[in-house]
Image (tube, grey):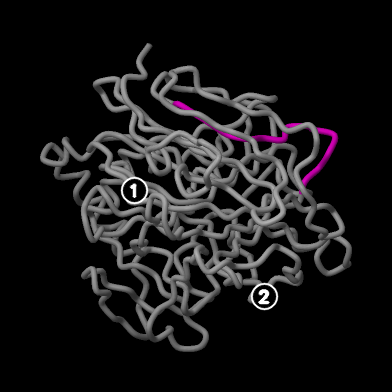
Amino acid sequence: MWTRPLNSAQVPKIEIVITLTMQYKMNVLLLLFVFFGVSLCEVGNISEDDDAALEKQVKMMNKPPVKTFVTAEGDAIDCIDIDKQPSLDHPLLKNHKVQKEPTFHVTGLGRNFSHMKSIQFRLREPCPVGTVPIPRVTKKDLIRTRAIARMPFLASSRLDAAQSSEHVICLGDSKTDDIKYGLYGRTSIYNITVAQDQFSSHNIWIQSGPPDHVSMIVAGWIGDGYRNGCYNLLCPGFVLVDSGALINTPLVGSTYGGDQRELAILVQQVNFTSNQDRTTGNWWLLIGFPPAKVGYWPKELFSNLQDGCEVTAWGGVGFAGSDGVCPPIGSGHKPDGDYRHATYFRILHRVEANGAYVLPSGDVVETLDQSNVYDLKNYRYDGSLGYWIGYGGPGGNCSG
């Protein structure tokens, strides 16, 4: 979710990318309309009719709060009745009943080390019981949604770059006869500097479906210039359940060669071994260690994620600016075997149908952009780091 950063272009933010609900068909034209349109540099040219439409949308999205407070960054947060949150206005969720808790339990996913600090994002005082913290929406927020770059999807064993400005590095498992029910990893975060029209994303992918009808979930952290709009709760669909989890917050980065700040991410479909969960099928997001049960994407949003997924991946994406220059990814350094240098994903696991957490299969594929400004190293299993990869690079001229 984007927020007013502490230091405009240098503060990474938690991202729950709502391209994750994209399905590239008629039922998501509204979302595609939100994603594409004018950029921030065109704000002054918004028509009177368009401005009125934005005002109407702002009023619809800002529900009557039970309580309101302002963060240290100056953002207004409304505590909204959990059953009246804006996400439930999604046309596919008219009869949706909020699931307050997942029915699976997270166990056996590694431990913390003194030199690895797990990111926790909690309100100093949570919202009242029965409510959830929703950032107040403004017209500026909605305008920013129109500048967002579409998160690329994974096709077969490679990333299908829909735009020439997309540069991707990832470790993926696209063996379609091996259905996955979730993905886990801990990634280090860094304060990186990117230009106004660049975008640097570090995330996990969960995806199923043919290229013309993809259902996709993406979660991670970003460093960006202006493309920080339609993420998280700005787009309808993601159901928030944690009254104290303020995802829309700046993060403190790691120190190169020193202590690492890491973000643990788990996206998991509820365990299909019980009769109750067979009728639920929601995809839950858990963040941090120990994990906070943030919320979920209802199964109604997806045509091709009803029963597990075909493709999973860990890695990053760099969107080049208009000058053909790519931003840094990760720490801005290529991997050299030292986890304190390049950004990593560690303790990699996928989730099986019975809810068991297992290591990546032997059929993983390394996708590496050909611009030579980034790199990826698969170190596989290590006793202390678990199964891990190092990735990223300084960016630079990547137009050729």
Question: In the figure, is residue 128 to the left or right of 6?
Answer: right
Q: Nearer the viewer, residue 133 or 371?
A: 371
Mark 2 Cα-neighbour bin, 10 Å: few <14, some 14–19, many ≥20: few
Residue 108, image x, y percentages? 75, 66
Q: Is residue 25 visible?
A: no
Q: Residue furthest top?
A: 400
Residue drawn where x is 59% and y is 59% of the image: 93
- Percent x, y of residue 313: 63, 39
User: Helix or strand or loop: what does disc 2 sit on?
Assistant: loop
Badge 1: residue crowd in 10 Å (few <14, some 14–19, many ≥20): many
Residue occupying the point 32% across, 74% down: 77
User: On the rendered structure, is 73 left or right of 256?
Assistant: left
Determine whether label 1 and label 2 are within 8 Å by CB: no
**What residue is pinned by disc 2?**
101
Q: Number of callouts in the render?
A: 2
Query: Residue 364: which quarter of the image?
Result: top right
In the rendered image, which quarter contains the N terminus?
bottom left
Q: Which residue appears at 47% of the width and 81% of the height?
A: 131
Residue 347 visible to an observer of this rendering: yes
Q: Position of residue 244 (x, y in %)?
A: 46, 79
Q: Residue at x 24, y 36 (%)?
A: 195
- Badge 1 or badge 2: first in the primary sequence: 2
Q: Report the amino acid beneath label 2.
A: Glu
Question: Is 342 situated above or below 370?
Answer: below
Q: Quadrant of residue 385?
A: bottom right
Q: Position of residue 310 (x, y in %)?
A: 75, 38
- The magenta segment: 167-180
Q: Amino acid at mark 1?
A: Gly
Q: Which quarter of the image is occupied by the C terminus?
A: top left
Residue hosting label 1? 229
